[in-house]
Amino acid sequence: MVSLSVAIVCLYCSGSYAAQANRLEHERFSVYLKGEAEYARPLTLVVEDKGCHSYALVNSFERDDSAGIIKVSIQHNSNSFATCRGPGIHYFPLPHKFGGQAELRVFAADDDSKLPAFEQANYVGSLVFTVNAIGADKFALESPAPASLQSGIGLIRGWACSLSYLEMAIDDGERFPIAYGTSRVDTRGVCGDENNGFGMVFNWGLLSPGEHNLKLWRDGPTEPIAEVNFTVGGLGEAFIRGLTGTYTLEAFPTPGESTLIEWRQDLQNFIILEKRD
């Protein structure tokens, strides 16, 4: 959960530049940070375009997590090819991995500017803010579990506090993004909010039978935050069609009871239909 308290530092404010409470004003745009719950992760920069025929976008971005500094360069130019729709509001996620006091440094650049993005002459001002990143480094990869056996179509899942995006790779192959932000009420005590779940449907039959490895990364090219070894079983094909079958497991789950199971093609696995005494 990210909560913000914001102050203004404007070292070169003059002429068309001015600082107001919790935002920076430029002649063509104004910027401020969103700290409401729906924008809590990642930190979000809001750019309000003031002109009918101009627009603003973040064309350069840098961050220094060790110093708690984010730099953004906002480009503005003529939007002559579009119909006038009035001023617009743009939202830009600002990934970060820090808590406590931090600083957002804003620079402006015209479309024909030859100056580097973060040249001091382009400096508009800074927003100094405080990030309360509760449980920022807390996470859990729940499935696949270590040394588990996987088959059929399953779910890679878990939870993590305060991240921008999540990627996974199996056997050091290509990285894939994992959907993040589903409700996990059970993580509120650790993370301070609930939207921390992640998951990805995966067909284990795409992997060869035997042992495999899965790694997770968060927020860019860092070291993996989680790694697990697991084993894949199955019937030797990625997706088997045309099979049907209903069977009884005797003495399961306890002696004197039985359980009825059925093959499901969509899951490439068996499901429990009912328990019988």
Image (tube, rainbow, N blue to C red):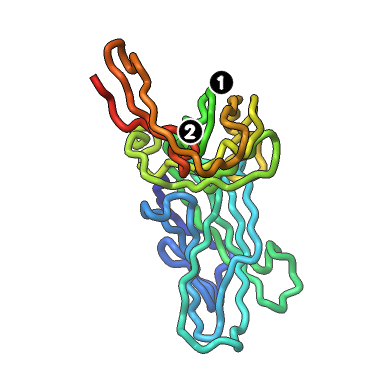
Identify the element where label 2 is drawn: strand
Three-letter code, disc 2: Phe
Q: Position of residue 103 (x, y in %)?
A: 54, 51
Q: Position of residue 18 (x, y in %)?
A: 50, 71
Residue situated in front as seen by the camera: 91 or 204: 204
Q: Quadrant of the N terminus?
A: top left
Tag 2 residue? 139
- Residue drawn at point x = 47 percent, y = 46 percent: 180
Three-letter code, disc 1: Ala
* Residue 232, placed above or below residue 178: above
- Residue drawn at point x = 64 percent, y = 66 percent: 59
In this orientation, does residue 100 appear?
A: no
User: Residue reaching furthest right?
Assistant: 114
- Residue drawn at point x = 66 percent, y = 76 percent: 110
In this orientation, does residue 132 appear?
A: yes
Q: Quadrant of the C terminus?
A: top left
Tag 1 residue? 147
Residue situated in front as seen by the camera: 29 or 22: 29
Q: Position of residue 130 (x, y in %)?
A: 45, 47
Q: Quadrant of residue 253?
A: top left
Q: Quadrant of residue 115?
A: bottom right
Identify the element where label 1 is drawn: loop
**Within 10 Å of the Cα at label 2, are there few (<14), some (14-19), or many (20+) other Cα atoms?**
many
The answer for how far apart the CA atoms under marks 1 and 2 are is: 19 Å
- Residue drawn at point x = 74 percent, y = 65 percent: 116
Which is more foreground, mark 1 or mark 2? 1
Q: Earlier in the sequence, mark 1 or mark 2?
A: 2
- Do residues under tags 1 and 2 come within 8 Å of each other at their CB atoms? no
